[in-house]
Image (cartoon, rainbow, N blue to C red):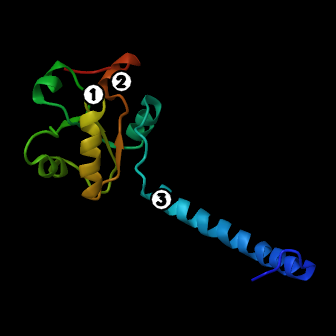
Amino acid sequence: MINPLDPLARQRMVQRMKHLIPALALLLSIGSCSRAAESPAAPANIEQAERHLAGGAQLVDVRTKEEWDEGHLEGAALATVTEEGFLDKATAKLDPKKSVLVYCQSGKRSAAATQKLRAAGFTVHDLGGGIAAWKAAGKPVVK
C-alpha cells in the first residue's frame, strides 16, 4: 500500500499516472472508433440523396404497387419490402457493385429494406422522410 503522505511515494504514483492516462485514452478512442464503424449511417437528406443518384446509385422504391402507381421517383425499381421474397426480388434487379438508394412513403419500411440489403452485402442509403420528404422539397415524381 502506498502512503499518500510519503512525498517519494506520491511522486512515484504521479509518474505512473502520467503513463497510464495516455494509454487509457488510446484504448477508449480505439473502442469508440470500432463502435462508430458498426453503427449504421443516418438516413440521407434530399441533397445527399441527389448526390448519391448523380453518382450512379440505383434507386429502389420499397412501397406497394398501389403506392407506386400514385407516383414514384423517376428511374426507380419497385421491390415491395413487405412481400415474401423481397430480398431475392430486389437483388435480382440490382448490381452489387453499385450503391443503392431506397425509399418508401416516410422512412419506416425503407429502414427495414436498408437493413436487409446491407446484410446481403449492398452499400445502401435510405432516403430520410421517404417520398413524402422528396415531394415536400418540390422534387418531381412520375406516374
Q: How many marks?
A: 3
Q: Residue at x 22, y 49 (%)?
A: 94
Give the image quarter of residue 32: bottom right
Q: Which mark is residue 73?
A: 1
- Note whether residue 59 is visible: no
Q: Is residue 102 left or right of residue 14?
A: left
Q: Which mark is residue 35?
A: 3
Q: Amino acid at mark 1?
A: Leu
Q: Amino acid at mark 3?
A: Arg
Give SS at disc 1: loop
Q: Would you place residue 65 above or below residue 9 in this image?
A: above
Give the image quarter of residue 76: top left
Q: CA distance from mark 2 to mark 1?
A: 9 Å
Give the position of the C terminus as an image quadrant: top left
Q: Which mark is residue 109?
A: none
Q: Which residue is mark 2?
A: 134
Q: Would you place residue 2 above or below residue 48 in this image?
A: below
Give SS at disc 3: helix
Q: Amino acid at mark 2?
A: Trp
Q: Residue at x 17, y 40 (%)?
A: 81
Question: Which of the two discs, 3 and 1, sits closer to the camera?
Answer: 3
Q: Is residue 83 left or right of residue 72?
A: left
| Residue 128, percent from left and from top | 37, 32
In the rendered structure, which disc, 3 or 1, sits on the residue that comes first in sequence? 3
Q: Residue at x 68, y 73 (%)?
A: 23
Give SS at disc 2: helix
| Residue 126, percent from left and from top | 34, 39
| Residue 18, percent from left and from top | 79, 73
